[in-house]
Amino acid sequence: MNIVGITSCPSGFAHTPMAAKALEKAGKELGVKVRIEQQGIMGRVNELTEEEINAADFMLLVSNQKVEGMERFKHIPIIHVDINQCVTAADKVLSKCIKAFEIKKATNA
Amino acid sequence: MCSDKHVDSLASSDSFMLSEKSIFLNVNLRTQDEVFDFIGRAAQSLGVTSNEKMLVKELKKREEDLSTGLMDGFAIPHAKCDLVSCPTIIYIRAKEPVTWKMQEGEGAQHFFTLLVPNKDAGKVHLEMISKIAVCLLEQKFRDEISHISNTHDMFLYLKQSLNME
């Protein structure tokens, strides 16, 4: 399973990198590939490549504000999650999203 | 990397504030407002802001946008604004936990205050600010911080965590 995402918070330097790192770490622990692009005060950090986006099963929108380049993900489901929850409970958030995605996939099949 | 020259004048944009003077242990703070007021005073005395009242307003606004309480009694009040002259890390430990909206647990006792100017502050310094935030994701880091009992050791540990020369 391949998951991509974008984190973006109001100030752009604390929750943004924290949520990104926490989600990527949780992905490793769950055995899924998670790649998160940060949109913060240093511009786009770890920008997602076309390959990564094309290979993605779904996208995590980890932000309550406008995020750049959302048109890149129009081919996959977008799951909107809370950035604060991703900072402190990334494993729970990720598990829930994966489960939701798999259920949806099964019901659509 | 850190400089005491901030004490008497407003820090310049190419400097970075983290020193023993920006570490406060065992502070008597009972409410969230008292925490923000203390941060304002500390920032003014460090030469990082020239308008502590407005900075306090800004911190409160940020807090409303997105709560800064995390877990294990750690919170990261922060702001990015013109009122801040250089990237700054202020660590404050309250005597007792303060009521604070947390993601996990109740109350905040460790306040990693992160202040960033609006103007260009240099990639390296901004990366250090983000780095300390990311350090807080680690249980080991939070445990170490909780057990350090003097400002000198705290400063050394933070400097080491940031890999500062």
Image (tube, grey):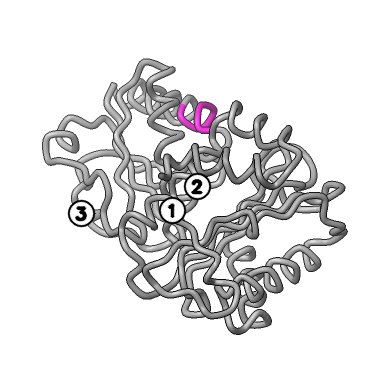
Q: Cα distance, mark 1 to mark 3?
A: 16 Å
> To which residue does mark 3 refer?
A71
Determine which of the numbered discs, if any, sits on residue A63 in the image.
Answer: 1
Q: Is residue B157 left or right of residue B69?
A: left
Amino acid at circle 3? Glu
Taking the spot 83% from the left edge, 47% from the top edge, the residue there is: B97
Taking the spot 68% from the left edge, 82% from the top edge, the residue there is: B53
Amino acid at circle 2? Ile
Instruction: Provide the major secondary structure of the magenta segment.
Output: helix
**Which of the 4 image quadrants contains residue A36?**
top left
SS at mark 2 in the image = helix
Against A44, is B56 above or below? below
Circles 1, 2 touching at the beta carbon (< 8 Å): yes
Circles 3, 2 touching at the beta carbon (< 8 Å): no
Tag 1 and tag 3 share a subunit? yes
The chain holding disc 2 is: A
Taking the spot 29% from the left edge, 45% from the top edge, the residue there is: A37
- Where does residue B70 sit, x and y in percent of width and height? 64, 44
Q: Which residues are magenta?
A: A90-94
Q: Earlier in the sequence, mark 3 or mark 2?
A: 3
The chain holding disc 1 is: A
Q: Where's the N terminus of chain B, which quadrant? A: bottom left
- Pick the front one: B120 or A74: B120
Q: Where's the C terminus of chain B, which quadrant? A: top left
Label 3: how many residues lie within 10 Å, few (<14), some (14-19) or many (20+)?
A: few
